[in-house]
Image (cartoon, rainbow, N blue to C red):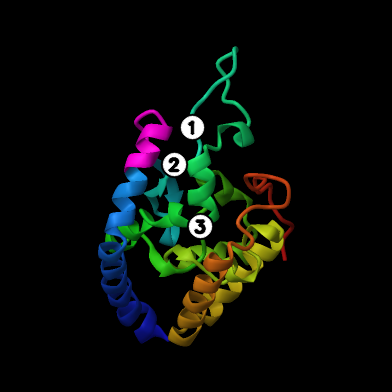
Amino acid sequence: MKVYVLFIKPIADILVASLVFVVLLPIFFVLTIGLLIANNGKPFFIQIRPGKSERLFKILKFKTMNDKKDADGELLPDVDRLTPIGKFVRKTSLDEIPQLLNVINGDMSLVGPRPLLPEYLPLYNSSQKKRHEVKPGITGWAQVNGRNAISWDEKLALDSWYVQNISMGLDIKILVKTVFKVLASKDINPKEKPTIEKFTGSPES
């Protein structure tokens, strides 16, 4: 397992991500132009996220919501800021395409726990902290086993399980299942909500 994690997986990540990005380049450009128009010149969503060993990096995604505000200068609710093209991009998971550049840059892996918000770092229990022992991924074990349709505790437990059982066979299984999940557009959002609720912490396991 160590040989795979330390040598094979990083090389495979860069090679596969580079190939996939080249193949998807026409779609990347079309979506960039469309979102550039829909979001008033802001096609990308850039945010600081913690990666392996909790090292911070800038994650890159397509921006699916605009920045419209109310009369008091506050951002409108997420459901009111989700643009038509943003709904399509999110439903088809095409908003993840720019993260291939994060993989090529070495900040992420194709498969691993999803990178969450830095503010969650103090909230994890000892088991949940294991998710930062590996690079975060574009897809992961939690994403193919419920994604945003399961609770935070379930999701983080699946992340910890992945870290303890990582292997080439498991990664291939996750990638194959991801393709079917994306094609079926399953578990993209929690029920009746455009975005998932924030994580507020779990008791020590």
Residue 32 relative to residue 152: left or right: left
Secondary element at tag 2: loop
Q: Residues within 10 Å of mark 1 (few under 14, many from 20)?
A: many
**In the rendered structure, which disc, 1 or 3, sits on the residue that comes first in sequence?**
1
Question: Relative to 99, is 80 on the left or the right?
Answer: right
Q: Are marks 1 and 2 in contact (CB under 8 Å)?
A: yes
Quarter of the image where one finds residue 124:
bottom right
Which labelled disc corresponds to residue 40? none
Q: Which residues are magenta?
A: 33-42
Q: Residue 30's spot in the image, x, y percent?
A: 32, 48
- Residue at which label 2 appears: 63
Q: Quadrant of the N terminus?
A: bottom left
How many dots with numbers?
Answer: 3
In the image, residue 144 sits, relative to residue 30, either above or below, namely: below
**Secondary structure type for disc 3:** loop
**Depth check: 63 or 25 in front?**
25
Q: CA distance from mark 1 to mark 2?
A: 8 Å
Q: Which residue corresponds to the image point at 46% horizontal and 82% vertical from the top-left?
A: 172
Q: Callout 1: helix, strand or loop?
A: loop
Q: Which mark is residue 66?
A: 1
Indicate whether residue 1 is drawn in magenta: no
Q: Amino acid at mark 3?
A: Thr
Residue visible at 39% across and 67% down?
109
Which residue, as the protein is rendered here, is positioned at the far top?
71
- In the image, residue 202 sits, relative to residue 180, either above or below, namely above
Q: Earlier in the sequence, mark 3 or mark 2?
A: 2
Residue at mark 3: 92
Residue contact between numbered discs 3 and 2, judged by CB atoms under 8 Å: no
Residue type for callout 2: Lys
| Relative side of 130 to 14, left or right | right
Would you place residue 149 above or below residue 44 in this image?
A: below
Quarter of the image for residue 144 reads bottom right
